[in-house]
Amino acid sequence: MQSAKNQLEKKEILARQAVSDRQDAEALLNQERIRTRTLSHELETIRAESQGKLKFRGIETLSPQAVQAYLSKLKSIQTTAGDLLTAYLPQGTRLSGVISEKVLERVEEETRTLLDRLEPETGLVLFYDFHRMVCEAIAPPFPITFPTWELGDSFEVSVLEEILSKDYRMLVLVLHAGESFIGFTPDAQVFDTEELIRSSVKEKHSKGGFSQRRFERLREEDIAHHMDKVFEVLNKTLEENSPVDCIVMSGDAQLLKEIQRYLPLNLEIIEKPSDLKLEKTGGEEILRTVLSSRRYLL
């Protein structure tokens, strides 16, 4: 009986100690949780501030000829350390969703932040040297269809070369109020047919009141008449050059949105920002512009 009583007393002491230890552990855990939340908040604040300060080292547009020279230089870069990273990212794809976590950790956070800011409709190709001798991305004129990456002694440019060399049967639309362009190329090399559509459209009115409302209504009527002419040429061009692989569009956002409602659903549409002034630009220059790539130095 005494032995059992002694054992019971020891168990009770151990139980009280266990309760005390648990309370101490919970208190410490709560402190760590608060500290973690505080540090996380501070980190997010620092990231937000640093993102505002981060800037691209440079941005440039590369013509089809300039892209070929650019790729030739990339292919000349060789290493024996296997530390050259190439990543193909379709539109809406993050680098973190493509490459392995182990490799991602070796890419500087500033580079990842800048890369995540870019959302071109055709996607991006990242060329990254872990010594940052090369750290840039390029948005090709045509979409990257699937994500892939490679880490090796050279950059993987064959997929990009294939994208650039494909013979697209392509329709190009540049839409502005009063002046629009429609061109068709069977090989993404030269326009087979092209047409500049002009209409008289009133300039925007800055005065207020009834006069402005009336003026805007007349301007909208002018734009509608212009778009009727555009639709007429567009339908004719599509009929005479079927099938068409894709349509590249640029110009006034409202007009682009309007015309998309009338385009066949099976056509791939690529929308590109552009400040082309049609009165100063010929078909050759328009095609060179829409086939150009965008290079971002990260």
Image (cartoon, rainbow, N blue to C red):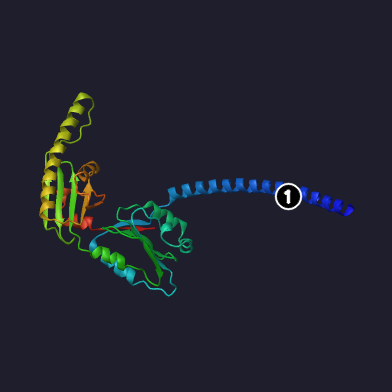
Query: Can you name the residue that lies furthest to the front here?
Result: 1
Query: Can you name the residue that lies furthest to the right here?
Result: 2
In-image side of 51 versus 201 (left or right): right
Residue drawn at point x = 53 percent, y = 49 percent: 43
Residue 57, quarter of picture: bottom left
Residue drawn at point x = 20 percent, y = 57 percent: 245
Q: Secondary structure at mark 1?
A: helix
Query: Can you name the residue that lies furthest to the bottom here?
Result: 80
In-image side of 290 versus 74 (left or right): left
Q: Position of residue 178 (x, y in %)?
A: 15, 41
Residue 215, quarter of picture: top left
Quadrant of the drawing holding the C terminus: bottom left
Residue drawn at point x = 73 percent, y = 49 percent: 21
The relative height of residue 52 versus residue 200 in the rendered view (above or below) is below
- Can you identify the residue that label 1 sits on? 21
Disc tally is 1
Q: Position of residue 108 (x, y in %)?
A: 46, 59
Asked whether the viewer can see residue 87, the reply is no
Q: Amino acid at mark 1?
A: Asp
Residue drawn at point x = 22 percent, y = 64 percent: 166
Q: Position of residue 259 (x, y in %)?
A: 20, 44
Count residues near mark 1 (Cα–Cα under 10 Å), then give few for <14, some for 14-19, many for 20+: few
Q: Position of residue 120 (x, y in %)?
A: 32, 53
Asked whether the viewer can see residue 169, the reply is yes
